[in-house]
Amino acid sequence: MINTSTTDSKTSLNRKTPPTIIIIFGASGDLTARKLAPAIFNLSKDNLLPKKCFLIGYGRSAISDESFKNEIKEALDAHSRRKIEASTWNTLEKNLIFHAGAYDDLNSFLTLEKKISKIEKQIDCKAQCLFYVSTPPGVFMPILENLGESGLAKRHRGTETASKVIIEKPFGRNLQSAHELNQVINKRFDESQVFRIDHYLGKETVQSLLVQRFANSIFEPVWNRNYVSSVQITVSEDIGVGNRGGYYDKSGALRDMIQNHVMQLLALTAMEPPSSLDPESIRDEKVKALKALKPLAIEGESPDVVRASYAAGLVGGLPTKAYLDEEGIPQDSGTETYAAMRLYLDNWRWKGVPFYLRSGKRLAMKASEIVVQFTRPPAILFGQDSRLKVSPNLLVIRIQPNEGVTLYLNSKTPGLETKLQPIKLAFGYETTFGSDTPEAYERLILDALNGDGTLFIRGDEAEMSWGLLSPVLDYWDSQGRQGLESYASGTWGPLAADKLLLGSGHEWITGRSYD
Ligand code: BG6
């Protein structure tokens, strides 16, 4: 639930979560160690988990409960945002269990069912199961089918302890596979039990985007084609693919970042005000915004999309490898590590306003920003004389790092001569609220435990976003490396991405010193 107020009786924080068994598929994976285990223990530290809470790690290689506990302990030491002291560790430690099994073997799910029933006997009450599917996407289907076939999906259905399932990204590889996944989900679960995760929606700044837009009266009147000349969304990373080459090469920037994280940021920026804060109202409005997106021009003179892959370069002063030299990447790989696009929404609010999106690895810095650029005032009083240059007003919403919001306005520089200069009105989360912010996964796991789907993606949303991007992926697949641009690591991407903005009077803003 969007944390609009600390006293809101509807927030997850105030709900009483029933006894719970969290089952993680892919328990020995990287995500469990880096994000899921730390999130669960931080929730426990804040007393946000039910008193009766168990964690079952499900994985293919058999390990003892003891080894599983050691793995989790190491993960917490390495990745938790706060120290997990003995009292928190001891509360959950005794409830950590490992279950070995294949993902496509119904028997392993039936024995899991027995373990769950045994726990219920032990605690002498019903418990809700939260299944977290955090495996490679290739086994999502058999896991979902077996949850259905074994009866685990419909345990206690219709009660407050009904089973729930969180499904990690990527949700499908294209429109068709996302549709097939949705079909299996619909066959096996009610939509109210399903939580398609996009961890960007759990980030504090993303949650507060709706508050900024709809709890302040100064933005809404100008949030449209009459006053906004463009919107830019940049999600850049300075890291390369690291040891994830095997996954990444089958994925690429469009599938890994744009289809989910970036499109969600776009939907939240562009959507109409929802009629209430309930999950369906918000998701309905996001779907409407995505529906309004015009199909992309993929080829021809001036395509709306650009893709590129990183060459060697310098990042943070250190030499880095080209994508093709990374571990596990085939020499003829046509996978993009960078994608940029120009989009238009065909609706009343946004007609004619370009939305520029870009995301890539090995760029100059890690930065996720939404930049709303406003139209210039008429050049009557200022703007005709070069000393009186009027810069466009910008609202920069910084999602990470240095979370905050900055508004750029024109001001007169002090002195006898009249000169204009853009100045910043800046708000920083850390300066105002301190740095003790929960991680996205904490918020999202807590919301799923409480059945609140506001910050999760609905099936039709996922399909809508794939519907726009699948033709691009098909075209790129058909082209291999042809048309794949290159950029030096540590830069802001290929020159071709600047062409998307050519002649529009806009330029990419994130990463540029604007003062
Ligand atoms: C993940 C992608 O979803 O998001 C990764 O698979 C990417 O490739 C990561 O590095 C970025 O997340 P964050 O929270 O660090 O911006």
Image (spheres, grey):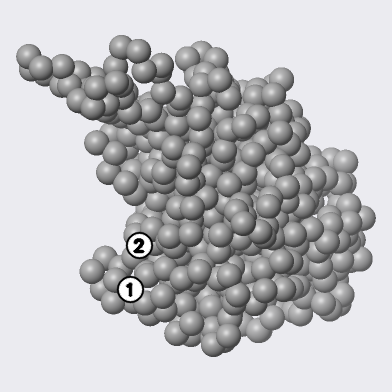
State if disc 2 and disc 1 touch (CB < 8 Å). yes
User: Which label number is shown at residue 313?
Assistant: 1
> Residue at (67%, 60%) from the top-left corner?
299
- Which residue type carries mark 1? Gly
Which of the pair 369/385 is nearer the observer?
A: 385
| Above-or-below relation of 311 to 438 | below
The answer to which image quadrant residue 54 occupies is: bottom right
> Residue at (33%, 28%) from the top-left corner?
391
Characterize the local packing of mark 2: few (<14), some (14-19) or many (20 or more) Cα atoms within 10 angstroms: some
Q: Is residue 352 left or right of residue 239?
A: right
Q: Which residue is mark 2?
A: 491
Please state the horizontal and vertical placement of residue 208, each as a whole percent of the image: 50, 32
Please state the horizontal and vertical placement of residue 5, each as a whole percent of the image: 52, 24
Q: What whole-number distance in Å separates the C-alpha atoms at marks 1 and 2?
A: 8 Å
Characterize the local packing of mark 1: few (<14), some (14-19) or many (20 or more) Cα atoms within 10 angstroms: some
Which of the pair 24/201 is nearer the observer?
A: 201
Q: Is any atom of residue 237 visible in this view?
A: no
| Above-or-below relation of 35 to 386 | below
